[in-house]
Image (cartoon, rainbow, N blue to C red):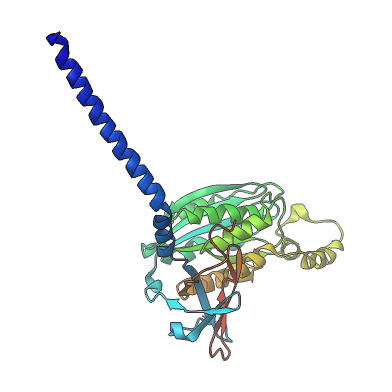
Amino acid sequence: MKCYAKPTTARLGSLRRAAIHLLAIRFLFFALLSGGALCQDTTLHSQSNVVVIPALVKNAQGEAVYGLTAKDFVVDDDGEEQAVHLDEAAEGQAVSMVIAIQRGRRANYEFPRMRGLSAMLDPLVAEGRGSVAIVEFDGAVQTAQEFTGNSEKIAWTLKELQPGDGGAAILDAVDYSVKMLERTPKERQRVLLVISETRDHGSQAKVEDVVAEIGQSSTAVYALAFSPSRSNILDTMRGNNKNEMNPSPDLLAPLLMAAEAMKKNMPKTVAAMTGGEYEMFATGKNFDLRMIDFSNHLRSRYLLSIEPKTPHAGLHQLRVRLRDPGDRVVLARGSYWAAGAK
């Protein structure tokens, strides 16, 4: 019998230890369960609802205004004035930029007018604080170049752009690009430059989903748009599109322009939502001038922020203005989505 006594004692000891561990685990479980609400409340209390608002201030001549402080700005959240903070270090902030370029429909006729694009981006990447990705779209959207600070790669990708199909899925391209930017480090300034016509053709994304996506993002959207009907007329006058010419004058062109003017301008709407800028171009010189303004204004934005204490879930309307505006105007996002609203 002795030979079996020791294993039995050892086994009982092992069982006792296991029981003690189990009781300890159960005690810890119930302790966490009973204190869970306190822990959760503490976590929620420590979270901040910071809304970042890049803002550009321009005078009557369209020039950027410098030297303002947080006290110069007024930010209303659903009509209620908020305390405004200003990041003084925003000027040297690193930038993540996506350039979404239309290649569908008549966009290939605009490619020669965009020759100066890569040169305009050189100062941004030369500083070592800029990273650029290129998205191309027609009826579909795809990445032509992942984020890079290599100016040669950017120039090569832009040079290799090819004509696309008959689509211009602008809304899809915006949705795709904003999601790309949301994956970049939060401390970087996020910028989307859309180069497209004014009308959307063939997007599958839902407008309300993209609005929510933009509202939850701190991305500023800039848009350089062209009018296919206007550029068609200009190209016909210059003889640059002989394959599109009709033997007789195109009497429908003015009607086409009038019809387009009555329809929603997608790039302009998106740019206004984010406090970005919207401009049209019809020539290479126009494009270069618009890009110069864009490059200058990119580094001229004030990085404002507010911290609403108990924001309701859903869409919030923002209004950003100056206490003493004079002839100055503020371009800033007009709304945001509170966390968990979508």
As drawn, the residue found furthest toward the front would be 1
Residue drawn at the location 57% of the way across and 91% of the way down: 326
Nearer to me, 295 or 157? 295
In this image, 285 relative to 119: left or right? right
Residue that sits furthest to the left in the current view = 2
Estimate the x, y position of residue 8 in percent, counting from the top left.
Answer: 20, 17
Q: Is residue 300 visible?
A: yes
Considering depth in this image, is 312 or 327 the residue closer to the camera?
312
Q: Is residue 231 above or below residue 31?
A: below
Residue 91 position in % (x across, y down): 40, 73
**Where does residue 305 sit, x and y in percent of width and height?**
47, 73
Closer to us: 159 or 39: 39
Total numbered circles: 0
Residue 322, x across and y down, in percent: 54, 85
* Residue at left offset 60%, top offset 63%: 314
Does the rendering let one see residue 108? Answer: no
Residue at the image position 23 percent from the left and 30 percent from the top: 17
Residue 66, placed above or below residue 221: below
* Image quarter of the N terminus: top left
Residue 236: quarter of image: bottom right
- For the C terminus, the quadrant is bottom right
Point 29% across, 39% down: residue: 24
Left or right of 152: which side holds 317? Answer: right
